[in-house]
Amino acid sequence: MMKMTIIMPFLNEELETVNTIKSIYDTAPKDSFEIIAIDDGSDKFDPSVFNPYPDVIYKRNSKRIGVDGSRQMGIEMAKTDNILIIDAHMRFKNDKWMETMLAYLILEPETLWCTTCLGLGYGTMDLNQHKGAYYGADMLFVDSNAKPDRPAREVLESKWASKKSDNDYEIPCVLGANYFMTKKWADYIWGLKGLKMWGTSEPFLSIKTWMAGGKCKITTDIEIGHKFRSNAPYTTGISYLVYNKIFMCKTIFPNELADKLIGYLPKDVNYKKAMELIEDNKTEIEEAKDYYQIIFTSSIYDYCNRFDIKIP
């Protein structure tokens, strides 16, 4: 019986997509999942490479919408009660990872989970030769040690966290492109709806989950390998990252805090482009803000107190 929808966006990934899918087929129960492979406009890609894998649904975007838009598309397309969001350069262990995920989701259907992330790449994709294990993320609203050449990346940023205990425990933010949740919960918190192209998806999902009465947790007994790349096989404008940070501020934070955080963003050409997009999407922003005010049961200040996060 099909129980899990695996959402895998990709762009110019070539055969790495097939390697990721093969890894899933080799380690998960047959007929228990569907894979939605969303091609966000690769320069060239032959979908016939998926023919040996009957549970793969191939979708090609006629216009590029980015990884976050593609992930949201996958959430809306999902036919099962549970979803797993991954990148197209992952490796899975033969350790009953899917059965464990499903068991967690039965116990805690309003929890946004992430698994231990094993760093791969640098010449090898062997899970036994990973370059480090990572356990979700801490949150920084503003990094006082921000690098001068990337200030937009240091506002509302998730930072890899170290392991705190065995098994599962609460974390402020998921990270690692290994997130699983019920479709019902993803729909309830509006998933990644509203984000453009890329950036800030983990803080957006995580903080909304906590404020809506759910939890974010790491499970240390599931380990998924993730290839860390020095460069992506495509380019995306920084203005979209800035837009997503502003969108997040304006929809889920109180006005005073939102204005303060937006004030930390550099007022450069990317900021100008992002603000033009904000103006174009005012109706969508107001709609989202109104909805979140209905479903949120705690404040951003409750979230920060829970995890001892400094508010600027």
Image (cartoon, helix red, strand yellow):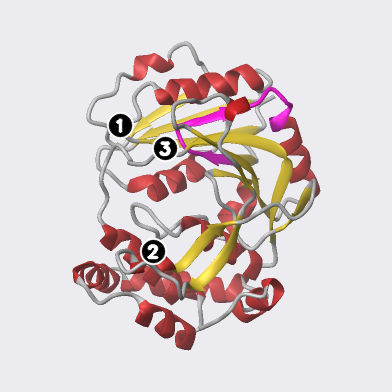
Q: Of the residues under marks 2 and 3, which one precedes in the sequence?
A: 3
Task: Give the labeled residue for mark 2.
Answer: 153
Label of residue 12 in the image: 1
- How far is the residue under mark 2 from the one under mark 1? 24 Å
Task: Give the labeled residue for mark 3.
Answer: 9
Residue 101, compared with residue 257, is above or below; it is above
Label of residue 42 in the image: none
**Nearest to viewer (mark 2 / mark 3):** 2
- How far is the residue under mark 2 from the one under mark 3? 22 Å
Q: Which kind of residue does numbered mark 1 sit on?
A: Asn
- How far is the residue under mark 3 from the one under mark 1? 10 Å
> In which quadrant is the N terminus drawn?
top right
Q: How many marks?
A: 3
Tell me which segment is drawn in magenta: 84-98
Residue 92, compared with residue 69, is above or below; it is above
Q: Of the residues under marks 2 and 1, which one precedes in the sequence?
A: 1
Name, please, the residue furthest toward the bottom. Answer: 256
